[in-house]
Amino acid sequence: MPVVRISLGRFEADQYEAVRSLLDESQQTLIPAIRALKGNRAFYAGVDSENNAMTNVSVWDTRQDAEQMDSLKAMLELARTFVDAGVQFERPITNHETLWTV
């Protein structure tokens, strides 16, 4: 069964537009970098304006494949950009074994 990786960041309501813009722009560098990784099945980036949160959810063949994100240079560089914009990331980033699917 695949592994689901979840990264969650929270920010102040007045930062929504800035965070949304940064998240949208991040696809330019992240998409090619993530596509080059072994075992990625899907990657979703999203923002929640009601709860002032951003998330990256990805699906991987194995936990080892998911953990490649821990050292992905493009992701690490962008994380600093988001922190500078006021995003506080929950740590640790979690990698979930799937037990069932629909």
Image (cartoon, helix red, strand yellow):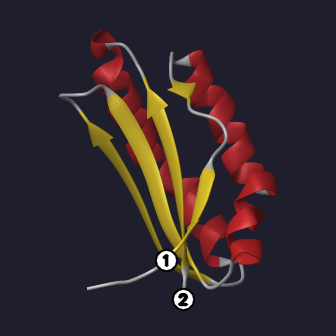
Q: Which residue is mark 1?
A: 98
Using the rendered view, name the quadrant where residue 1 is placed. bottom right
Residue furthest to the left in view is 50
Q: How far apart are the two marked residues, 1 and 2, measured between alpha carbons? A: 6 Å
**Residue shown at 67%/41% (left/top)?**
92
Q: Is residue 7 above or below residue 82?
A: below
Badge number at residue 1: 2
Front residue of 84 and 102: 102
- Choose the circle earlier in sequence order: 1 or 2: 2
Quarter of the rendering occupied by the C terminus? bottom left
Front residue of 26 and 53: 53
Picture coordinates of residue 34 (x, y %)? 62, 69
Q: Label 1: how many residues lie within 10 Å, few (<14), some (14-19) or many (20+)?
A: few
Using the rendered view, name the quadrant where residue 14 is placed. top left
State the SS at label 2: loop
**Residue shown at 51%/15% (left/top)?**
86
Picture coordinates of residue 31 (x, y %)? 54, 65
**Mark 2: amino acid:** Met
**Residue shown at 47%/52% (left/top)?**
56
Q: Is residue 53 above or below residue 16?
A: below
Badge number at residue 71: none
Badge 1 vs badge 2, beta-carbon distance below 8 Å: yes
Picture coordinates of residue 36 (x, y %)? 69, 77
Picture coordinates of residue 81 (x, y %)? 62, 28
State the SS at label 1: loop
Residue furthest to the front in view is 99
